[in-house]
Structures are given as structure tokens and as C-alpha cells.
Amino acid sequence: MLTIKNLHAEVEGKKILKGLNFSAKPGQVHAIMGPNGSGKSTFATVLAGKEDYEVTDGSVVYKDTNLLELSPHERAHLGLFLAFQYPVAIPGLSNINFLKTAVNTIRKHQGKDPVDAYDFLAQAKALAMRVGLGESFLSRGLNDEFSGGEKKRNEIMQMLMLNPSLCILDETDSGLDIDALKTVAAGVNAHRSPDHIIVVVTHYQRLLDYIVPDFVHVLIDGAIVKTGDAQLAKELEKKGYQWLMESAGGGA
Amino acid sequence: MINLEWPDKKEEYWRSSKVWPLLETVSWQQPSDTSYLSINHKNDKLLMDHPVSDFDLSQCADPFLHAIGHVSSRQSYLLGSGHWDAIYSPEHSQISWHEFTVQSGQVVNFSHTVKSQSANWQINVMVFHVEEGASLTVESMINSPDFKGVNIWIINQSKHSNFSYHRQHLDFTYQRDHVWVNQNGERANTSLKGVYASHGKQISEQLWTVTHHASHGTSSQNLRGVLADKAHAVAISQVNVIPGIAKIDSQQKLDHILLSSKATVHTRPQLEILSDDVVCQHGITVGALDEEALFYLQSRAIDPGLATNLLLKGFFEQIWQQELSPLLCEKLDLVLSEQKVEEINE
Ligand SMILES: Nc1ncnc2c1ncn2[C@@H]1O[C@H](COP(=O)(O)OP(=O)(O)OP(=O)(O)O)[C@@H](O)[C@H]1O
Ligand SMILES: [Mg+2]
């Protein structure tokens, strides 16, 4: 169970999240939509725990733990995973070495032995195939010179590898061709389970044809102003955000 | 022919250097035997070659070359194909000079390690003549906490020859590494690479120069360093292309990461290109650890210490392009653990 109450956050003195409320139960898929600059990535980044994002008010509780007190790697150990809108490239660090380090760190935390190198490689190759990345991507530098779509596929591959219980996918569908979109959606759907919470941030109702959400939320000016079911996304596709912005503005 | 031009105007930095007045107080010896340098090869002996002509460096503006002065007693050897291991362990403040010839078509791997218990100043000059079509790889390493001194490498390349230099400095007090490469013949290739992590009050100075005296040559210079505490480094890479030489492809890249606000680096690429038909790429960076990259790794459950370690190893591996030596990894671990202690104390 994830419960977020009255979350306020700022970056470099700029107030971005202004009283955000959100909750999700295991087994659910939530979609968050909203205009550019409304604070969707900020919300995702605050959950992941980036240092320069200052939480000034509110609470975030996941699995009965105050998430805000944990550092980013501790949040990951608790099961949180953020698929970045703009994944960084680390040229000298090979993708496979990175993945193995992450997997073994998590295993160590769970009191398990490190993975068998041979099994791990086989699993990594299979997952790479599944998200449409060739084996050669494993030995390349992490996201190094990957195309936009390849980086997004790589994020999904990491999600499947690390098997997190709380996934936030920040515009993982942006910049994908239609085949890639289907591949990514298939990856996410495979990860759907009664134990997992999945939050997808997207601009496009198209993604929600493939990943059908239980709830759709609209985030405007740092707060969730409307919540509905999958039907709401279709309505937004037709009407845009203006009508909601007016009522949000009126309420403020 | 050995060409050791290091124009005076570029020596301003050295005149203000804290190190060079110290040198004037050193009484230099020219060693009477060669036991301080052991050179081994599995199934080959070093052959003494004929002596080569004398040098007078007393007119050089560079304080170290000036200190070498007139050199007459030198050792000269022929190197056959294969792997050579040289251990340099001097005791006195000495100036030593060795010359090696890699004969035409031979492929030589020459590994040179400074392992000295002595805190006396050292100047060690190694000259290599790489003949037509020969390939020389020099693996150079310093691993002596008390070492204070200068290694000077002078490489003369004939046509179609290859020279690769792989440099790691691990432990030292003060180290200066001069590399002068002269491409005297056409279609020669030169690759200089260096990686290091330094801490405490270590001073490290890297001065590399490649001079293209012939056409169709390629050269690359890549140096990456990580500095913690109050470590100081100088990294200057120079490319000279003499007039009338064409089709030169050269590349210089000097990158440093500073882990502490008290660490300093003085770095720049220098070019003297007196010809048109030349492609020269150069770049330098000095910065802190990439916060975005650190956050990305942490978001994948990797703790900050390990994340930093991975990033720095990746930083090295990107140019090193082979597995980092266990000694270098150990040094990096040490630097990072001490850095953490410093942060806590601040
Ligand atoms: N580091 C920062 N410094 C200053 N302002 C920032 C910073 N990061 C985000 N912002 C600002 O915060 C606001 C919200 O940004 P955010 O990236 O969260 O929007 P978003 O909803 O994800 O937009 P998009 O749909 O374009 O991805 C924007 O106005 C942005 O300019
Ligand atoms: Mg965004």
C-alpha cells in the first residue's frame, strides 16, 4: 500500500508539488496524465529520493515505512523502481556489469547468495531479446549511444530483471515506434501482479489501449485534480486539459 | 636523432613550481653499475649494443632536463620480440639513462615498474628507437609511496612503427612523467593512455608531447585522473606538426574528476600545427562526480559508495579499454574510503 498525503516539494526554491494526494494498492495500475511542466516527473523523482528535490510538507508511506526518511538505494531495496523519462548514459560501465551489480546488491540485502554468472547471463540475454534489444546491448556501456527508444526498452529490461513491487514509469512510451510501444506494454503487463503497484506517467491515451489502467489521475500545477477510470483518458484525449485547469484554478 | 624541444615560454608554470627549487639542493650521481634496473625476459638475454652519441642538456630551460646536464655513461640494448619486465629500484639521487632499440619487425612488450624504497630524488631516462615496422608497448607503473622523481621517455619511431604507452601511477610522493614521441618516419601510430587516482598531498605531473616529423601519422593521447584530499596534478598534452607534413590525425583528451574541494589540477592541451592537412581533436574536462549518474545507480539499489566506485572505474575503463589492474582498483578503493572519512570529519 502506497499512501501519499499533502505532498509539497520544491526544486531550487521553486514550488512544484503543492499538496498532492495519492494512494495505490498492490495489484493496481494507475495512470497519471497532465500538461507539460505540471510536475509529473518531479513527483516521480521525489518518490525515488533525489537529493536536491526538497520535500517541505506532507508524507509518503509505502509498506508501512516512511519513504521520505530513506535514501534512494534504500527505497529501491524496499521495492521502488523509477523508469526515468531521460535515462542517463554511463559510457565506461557495461550494461551487464551494472545489471549484475544491481541484482547482487538486492540479493545480498535479502540475504541471498550472488547470482550464478552463467545463469545470470542466460537470463539477461533472454530478457534483452524480450524487450527487443540484441545481445550486443549487454556488453555496451550503460545507455551509451543508445537511441531514445533503446533507452526506454532498457529501462523495462531493468524493471523485469530487478522485479520491483512499486514501479513508476515516467513517459516510458514517449518517442517509441508502434512496435516498441507494444513491446514495452507487453513487458509492463507481464509485470502486473497482485503484489505489484504500477504507476504509468503518460501523455498518450494510446499506451492505455495496451496497458489498461484501473485509475487515471490528472495532475495539474502540482496536485491531482481529478481521478477516474480508463474512460477519463479517452475524455482527455478529446477535450484536452483546459476545462480541468479552469476548475483547478477556480478552486485555488 | 633525439629531439627534446620544450620551448621556454611554456615553462612559466615550472618556474613557479614549488618542486624545482628543491632540485637545486640535490646532488646527482651517475650510477656506476646498473643493478638498480633489472630487466628480465623468459628465454632471451639483453644484448649490449654499441654506445650512442652524447647529450648535453645543460642548456634546457626545463629544470629536470637541465639537471641531467651532460650524459655520457649510458647503457644501450637491443630488444627482441616478447615480454620484458623491468624493475627500477634506485637508492641514491641518481640520473640514469638507458637506450633500447626495437629492431625492424619485432613486437615488444616492455613493462616498467618503479619500486623504490628510497626517498631520494630520481631522474630516469628511457630512450627507445622503434625501427621500421616494429611495435612497442610500454606498460609503466609507479608503486612506491616514497618515490620522488621524474621518468622521461623518449621514443623515436621509424616508418610503419607502432608505439603504445599505458601509464598507471599508484603510489608516489611526487612523480613527473615526461613522454616525448617523435614520429620520424611515415605512417607511424602512437597511442598514449594513462589512468590514476591520487590522494593525500600527492603531486603528479604528466607532460606528453608527440611531434609529427613525417606524414600519414596518427597519434592519440588520453589521460584520466581522479583526485581526492589535497592532491595536485598537472596534465599537459602537446602535439607538434612540423611544416610540410600532411595527413596527420591526432587526438588529445584529458579528463579529471575532483572528489574534494582542496584537490587541484592544472591541465591543458597544446598544439603547434605548422601544416594544413591535419585533423586535430582535443578536449579537456575537470569536474565533480556526475550527480545524475550517481542518482541513477542509487535508484537501482546500489549504495552511494559502490555507485561512486563503479562510476570511477567506468571513467577509467572507457579509455583504458582493458581490465583495470587489481592494484589500481585497490588504490581507488583506498582513495574513496579516505575521502569518506574526510567528509565525515568536515
Ligand atoms: N531542477 C529544476 N530546477 C528548476 N526548475 C525545475 C527543475 N526541475 C523541474 N523544474 C520545473 O518544475 C516544473 C515541473 O517539471 P516536471 O519535469 O516535473 O514536469 P512534467 O509534468 O514531468 O512535464 P513533461 O510532461 O514535460 O515531462 C517545470 O516548470 C520545470 O521547469
Ligand atoms: Mg516529465
Image: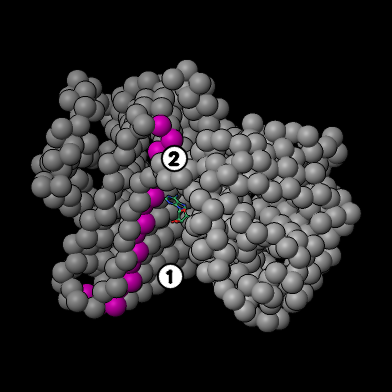
List x then y, in percent, for residue B126: 35, 45
Query: From the viewer's perspective, is B23 left or right of B300?
Result: left
The chain identifier of the residue carrying mark 2 reads B
> Residue, x 70% and y 69% (percent of image)?
A232
| Cα distance in 3D space between marks 2 and 1 | 36 Å
Q: Which mark is residue B226?
A: 2
List x then y, in percent, for residue A93: 59, 53
In this picture, is B239 found above or below B295?
below
In this picture, is A232 found above or below B51?
below
Q: Which mark is residue B133?
A: 1
Specify whether residue A8 is in view: yes
The chain identifier of the residue carrying mark 1 reads B
Please name whichever residue, B9 or A41, is drawn nearer the observer in this view of the structure.
Answer: A41
* Numbered label tally: 2
Query: From the viewer's perspective, is A186 left or right of B198?
Result: right
Which residue is the extreme one toward the right? Answer: A194
Report crowding for label 1: few under 14, some 14 to 19, many 20 or more residues within 10 A (C-alpha): some
Q: Is mark 2 within 8 Å of ligand 1?
A: no
Q: Earlier in the sequence, mark 2 or mark 1?
A: 1
Mark 2–mark 1 contact, CB under 8 Å? no
Please name whichever residue, B194 or B230, is drawn nearer the observer in this view of the structure.
Answer: B230
Which residue is the extreme one toward the front? Answer: A250
Residue stretch rendered in magenta on the structure: B245-260
